[in-house]
Image: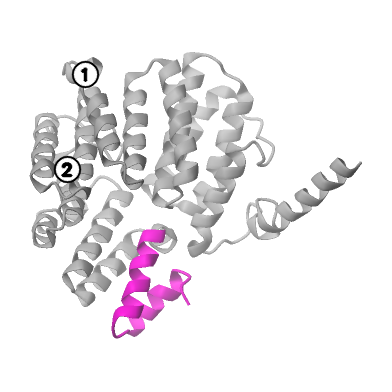
């Protein structure tokens, strides 16, 4: 009886703060600034098996639902992702598809979840999702999915400050025979993304020469693939010469060379980037570089450009909100800055 009462009390508490809250019910408005918290909360509950009952969706429709989720990710529609992605995860688990295709589908869902959790700076849940993606991808025997799961693990290891481990994960995955033999363009593109990840890790440990060597290697792979279609759109925005140049912007400022980062940014035409998410990334990276160089006005202008591209992402991402907060406390403010702060939920 005591156990039953305890569970009842916990359910009531969860309803007040979690997925059962009237604020969070499907169809009710959610502020863009709260979208990230809502997304993480619902994903957490779905991963723990505590979310809403899964929808009765035929297994064959789950792939189409995942394609819609990827489209929402590329368009930075975080409110819609908070509504749909946790339910997609719960439904895919409930379907009980133990075939290789079922494992591959779940691996893709967990990989997308990992990318979102990295954006929302929730490393604890990110590790859980990335490891589940890794195990499922290995069980499905899909080298491309295994490699992308490894890239997400490398990103999380870098964020944890485990630079040697992050480098090893990325480069070991890049050297897998299925990716290194050059027989499949998609696998080759994935290899380029892994090398790019290793370059970013080199940047974070202040190895500028290593970062530039690895970035040049990724750029060479992208150049060889440039005559074909945009590849791996759902893996890091794809690999093209332009997306590698975008990566170079963030890698240069992470390595501490702000001038080189701004020079790299001038060589990127934002309209040529393949998705809204990548264009928002460009302006956010540009804002960070200007912020490090002391260009407050240019930093704010880049943030406002990011907001025009992807308001939900700009308002929800902790990294962007931290940058806005630093502008508020480090110097004079303006009506534009105060307005952006308000839209980001910063009072």
**In whole angstroms, how far apart are the C-alphas of marks 1 and 2?**
20 Å
Q: Are marks 1 and 2 in contact (CB under 8 Å)?
A: no
Tell me the number on the disc at residue 184: 1
> Dot 2 surroundings within 10 Å: few (below 14), some, or many (20 or more)?
many
**Does the image show residue 197?**
yes
Foreground disc of the pair 1, 2: 2
Quadrant location of residue 264?
A: bottom left
* Position of residue 265 measured from the top left corner of the image (x, y, whole percent): 14, 57
Can you give x and y, in whole percent of width and height, for residue 343 in the image? 44, 71
Helix, strand or loop at disc 1?
A: loop
Colouring method of the image: one colour
Residue closest to the eye, 46 or 123: 123
According to the picture, the residue beneath numbered tag 2 turns out to be 244
In the drawing, does residue 18 fall left or right of residue 259? right
Residue 44 placed where, x, y %? 57, 44
The residue at the point 57 percent across, 28 percent down is: 92
User: What span is colored magenta in the figure?
Assistant: 318-347
Residue drawn at (56%, 36%) of the image = 88
Tell me the SS state at disc 2: helix
């Amino acid at each position: 009886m005591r156990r039953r009462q305890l569970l009842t009390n916990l359910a009531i508490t969860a309803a007040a703060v979690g997925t059962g809250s009237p604020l969070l019910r499907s169809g009710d408005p959610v502020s863009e600034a709260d979208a990230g918290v809502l997304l993480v909360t619902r994903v957490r509950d779905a991963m723990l098996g505590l979310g809403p009952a899964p929808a009765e969706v035929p297994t064959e429709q789950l792939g189409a639902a995942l394609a819609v989720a990827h489209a929402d990710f590329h368009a930075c529609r975080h409110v819609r992702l908070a509504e749909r992605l946790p339910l997609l995860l719960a439904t895919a688990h409930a379907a009980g598809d133990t075939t290789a295709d079922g494992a591959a589908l779940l691996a893709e869902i967990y990989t997308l979840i990992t990318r979102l959790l990295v954006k929302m700076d929730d490393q604890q849940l990110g590790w859980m999702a990335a490891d589940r993606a890794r195990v499922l991808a290995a069980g499905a025997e899909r080298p491309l999915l295994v490699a992308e799961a490894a890239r997400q693990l490398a990103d999380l290891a870098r964020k944890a400050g485990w630079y040697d481990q992050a480098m090893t994960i990325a480069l070991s995955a890049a050297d897998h025979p299925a990716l290194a033999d050059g027989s499949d363009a998609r696998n080759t593109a994935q290899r380029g993304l892994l090398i790019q990840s290793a370059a970013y890790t080199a940047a974070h440990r202040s190895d500028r020469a290593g970062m530039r060597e690895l970035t040049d290697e990724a750029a060479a792979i992208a150049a060889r693939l440039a005559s074909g279609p945009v590849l791996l759109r759902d893996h890091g925005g794809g690999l093209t010469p332009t997306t590698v140049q975008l990566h170079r912007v963030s890698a240069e400022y992470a390595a501490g060379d702000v001038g080189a980062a701004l020079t790299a940014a001038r060589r990127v035409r934002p309209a040529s980037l393949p998705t809204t998410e990548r264009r928002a990334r460009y302006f956010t990276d540009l804002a960070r570089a200007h912020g490090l160089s002391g260009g407050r006005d240019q930093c704010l202008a880049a943030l406002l450009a990011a907001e025009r591209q992807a308001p939900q992402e700009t308002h929800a991402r902790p990294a962007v909100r931290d940058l806005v907060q630093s502008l508020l406390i480090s110097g004079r403010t303006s009506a534009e800055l105060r307005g952006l702060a308000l839209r980001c939920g910063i009072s």
